[in-house]
Amino acid sequence: MKPTSAISAMLMLLMSAALILAQVAGADQPVDAAGPTTAAEVAQVPAAIIQIEDEINDYTRADLVRRFREARELGAKAIVLEINSYGGAALAGLETSRFIKQQNDIKVMAFIREKAISAGAMIAVACDGIWMSPHSFIGDAGVIAMAPGGGMQELGELERAKVESPIVEDFRDSAARNGYSTLLLESMVVVGREVYYIEDEQGNRRFVDGDTYKELSEKGWKPVIPDRNPIDSKQSLLTLNATVAEKVGLAKGIVHSAEEVAEKLGWTVVARLDRTAGDRLVAMLSSMTARGLLMTILLISIYMAVQSPGMGLPEAAAAICLVLLLGVPALTGYAQWWEVLLVLLGFVLLAVEIFLLPGFGLPGITGLVMIIAGLVLTFVPKEPVEIPGILPSLQGTWVALQQGFTVVIVSMLAAAGACFVIARFLPRVPMFNRLILTATVGGGYADSEQAQEAPDAVASTTWVKLGDTGTALTDLRPGGTAQFHDPNLNGPRNLDVVCDSGFIPAGAKLVVHELQGSTVVVRRIG
């Protein structure tokens, strides 16, 4: 496979993925219709169960839109959204919350199977009600900035307000929409909120801050939950377990399954739309381990393609890995178009350096930096707001940058070690030496029988000396095969060589320039 063909195939796959996402996003339109009003109608409501698991990202949101559409096609008039997530990209969480609130024709209940943290909590409170399983928890949706060197970074009032504003406003909107305490939900996002849940002698209950609590406690108001007073302190972000969430009115009840939620509400479950194998594959390929492995395979494949051009398998493997490394982050919303372009241009510059220019100079170094930077940035989600300056504002952004840089560097080191093993040891292993160009092209040991009769002669390089001249039998990119005169055989003999200029075409005259152990470095004559 030629490099241009691989790049074209990759671009076609990425464009197809973008078109699919565009079609899925087009389903994000609310439908106005009257819901059931009588008890008899409620008892006959068909419902579907939809899962939201693991990371919240653009792919998760698009998949949720698709499954809502599928549930409607199956006749569902209600949805039980089964949530089990630590959150994810803030922007994807905001868009998912907004989508749920636009569903005016369908009732959406959240069931927290294990956890609804950060963006997961944002989605849960956007639903028409929340049910929780025993030992599950919800909350901790705060915005925290991290310093470049690690640790907390102090944000100015204007910067913090701008970062928190869209998230806090979404929680406030959910509180007003579903009858929750605004103070309670805000304390999930903003550090410094002190929340008390108190009641008077007549049983009237209120959520109040610290100052109001001191004032009312003198008038006989007492904590509703004595062993959880305050509900949230100034030093923490509110996180509630199922028992406390039910006591404060955030959860409607504690159940063991999404099916039990439907049963409690008198709904009939007509479909359970769990994640498909494709969804799980995208989630798996989005993991740090999978992406690191893909990067390692990509670099090894490029090395083998350069050392043994024309085989096709290394080139195909490299193209597939590159498509997955850029395509999956593009689907999940982590890779922007300019980051994909940065990586592709980096490979172009690297190819120019390897195939067209001698040595390793500015184009090669620039290309390598662009590739590393682009791949690292594909680990970073887009922030919901932009603060002046080039540094990220959110904690998750800094963490993602550090993780991305670590994965890229570790993958490069692993690939370098693997390439060393391939170059030094695999050519001696019968099963793997076919991956290294040892076949002759005209003259010498042209047939396999002769090569088998003199394996030691073919493998040895001690007979060639500095200054010996020969001919390139294949293109050297920089590795390939050349033919020299062997005085011991008094005839031509083929040898694996590496050129020092990046590329030498087949048929060019060569001279042995350097001997590095078993590696023969040649230079083009003239």
Image (spheres, helix red, strand yellow):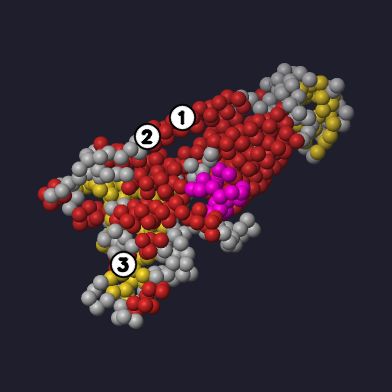
What residue does disc 1 label?
16
Residue 26 disc label: 2
Determine whether, in the image, residue 469 is placed left or right of residue 413. right
User: How packed is label 1: few (under 14 Cα within 10 Å), some, or many (20 or more)?
Assistant: few
Q: Secondary structure at mark 3?
A: loop
Looking at the rendering, in which quadrant would you find the C terminus? Answer: top right
What is the spatial separation of the Cα atoms under label 3 and label 1, in whole angstroms?
48 Å
Q: Secondary structure at mark 2?
A: loop
Looking at the rendering, in which quadrant would you find the N terminus? Answer: top right
**Is there any visible trace of residue 428 in the rendered image?**
no
**1 or 2: mark nearer the eye:** 2
The residue that appears at 37% across and 75% down in the rendered structure is: 213
Main SS of the magenta segment? Answer: loop
Q: Amino acid at mark 2?
A: Gly
**3 or 1: mark nearer the eye:** 3
Q: Is residue 170 above or below residue 230?
A: above
Q: Amino acid at mark 3?
A: Val
Residue furthest left as drawn: 40
Q: Decide which of tag 3 and tag 1 comes sooner along the chain.
A: 1
Q: Is residue 147 above or below residue 363?
A: below
The residue that appears at 82% across and 24% down in the rendered structure is: 524
The residue that appears at 51% across and 45% down in the rendered structure is: 382
The residue that appears at 53% across and 39% down in the rendered structure is: 336
Marks 3 and 1: CB-CB under 8 Å? no
What residue does disc 3 label?
248
Picture coordinates of residue 105, whole percent (x, y) = 25, 43
**In this orientation, which residue lies closer to the viewer: 147 or 76?**
147
Q: Amino acid at mark 1?
A: Ser
For the record, the magenta segment spans: 377-400
Residue furthest right as drawn: 467
Picture coordinates of residue 106, whole percent (x, y) = 25, 45
